[in-house]
Image: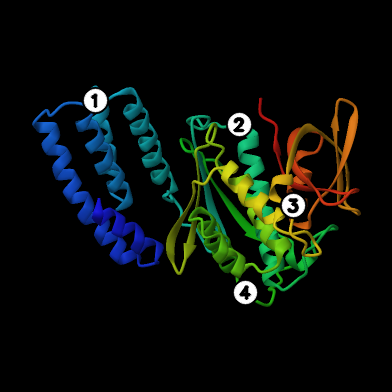
Amino acid sequence: MELAGLADLRKMEGNKVEAMSLYEQSYSLEYDVAMNAYKEQVGEPSVSVLLRSAASLAISCKKLREAEKLIALALSGEPPFEIAEELRNLLENVNFHRHLEVKGAELSDDEVQLVIAGRGIGYGYAKTDEIMNRIDCFKDLTVRTIERIAGKSFRKNGPVSPECKINPYMTSLQAASMAFRIKFSNPQEFILPGFGSYGSIIEDITDNISLINENKINILKDKIKDTSYFNNFIALTKELAPDGDIVNLFGITSIRSGQERKTLLTERKEKLSEVIRISQSDEDASGRTIDKGSNQTITGILKIADATTNTVKITIDGTAIALKVPDGLSDIVKKYWDEKVTVKYYQKNKKDKLLVDIEEYKE
């Protein structure tokens, strides 16, 4: 466990080679202990706990087949219910990593493979919204990243300029964890200053998602200094994130310097909602500090939206409540048109209420 903790630290520091070596040493020790406990029949829950720990370390050092066998061995016994559930979740994690692997034709620099997995994802099928919403969000994330790197001011409304417009093409879906590829092209064949290919855009997106997943929000703020772009990136990433119910894992496979790169997003939507709330509530447009405790929550139907004034109205039992929408959240709000939503906002002044977060209402 000391070796595993040191490996986690080296990984956070960016020393992946040393981290991998430490994970492998830790796994070797844990494997020996787990197998000895199994052969000596020391009883439950010790055996299943040790096998689970060894399997988790096997995943860390990318020994997926070994992890799969250890989990199967643990489940073949009589582990306590809670441990059995953890083992099943770990097996789901193994399968997710397997499906992040690109099968068949290789990815090019202008392609990504997106993968979702969870209890609501079956063999070759998933809820349409779970797929299409994430494709739309990833497209928006790509366009906004292109605009930001090109040095453009945040587009509050109106169409995307021709040089920033993209055409995403989706390949046929792959079964199991539900993997699908997206290929990008620019109809204008225009190269913006600041980057030379879609590969650099995809790299920027995956780097930033990794920072969010590793809870390095301050580093992301330093990288995306424009508040509107920062809030927009967090909000769109939240839409990609797992809900912990239907979708438990979300991943991206891309090409970086000729090598496959796998980016995991395991932070839940509610955690990213909290990041959005803190970011939006710290200060208003004039720099005045806002009391975070003043946030309020309402549930209603999003019925009216005005892009010119950045205003929406939430209808509750026939009464409409008007909310101002920050620039960074404008891409998200439009996805919930005519839907029942849960909205968080704070009272900016006597007249205006500022929307902080919005998501689909769940019973």
Q: Quadrant of residue 189?
A: bottom right
Q: Amino acid at mark 4?
A: Phe
For marks 4 and 2, the one nearer the N-term is 2
**Would you name the residue on which mark 2 appears?**
127
**Mark 4 and 1 residues: CB-CB less than 8 Å, in contact?**
no
**Mark 4 and 2 residues: CB-CB less than 8 Å, in contact?**
no
Q: Amino acid at mark 3?
A: Leu
For marks 2 and 3, the one nearer the N-term is 2
The alpha-carbon separation of the residues under discs 4 and 2 comes to 36 Å
Q: Residue at x 32, y 51 (%)?
A: 60
The alpha-carbon separation of the residues under discs 1 and 2 comes to 32 Å
Of 80 and 99, which appears nearest the observer?
A: 80
Please tell me whether residue 84 is drawn above or below residue 359 in the rendered image: above
Residue 145 can be seen in this image = yes
**Would you name the residue on which mark 1 appears?**
76
Q: Residue at x 47, y 65 (%)?
A: 256
**Mark 2 and 3 residues: CB-CB less than 8 Å, in contact?**
no
The alpha-carbon separation of the residues under discs 3 and 1 comes to 48 Å
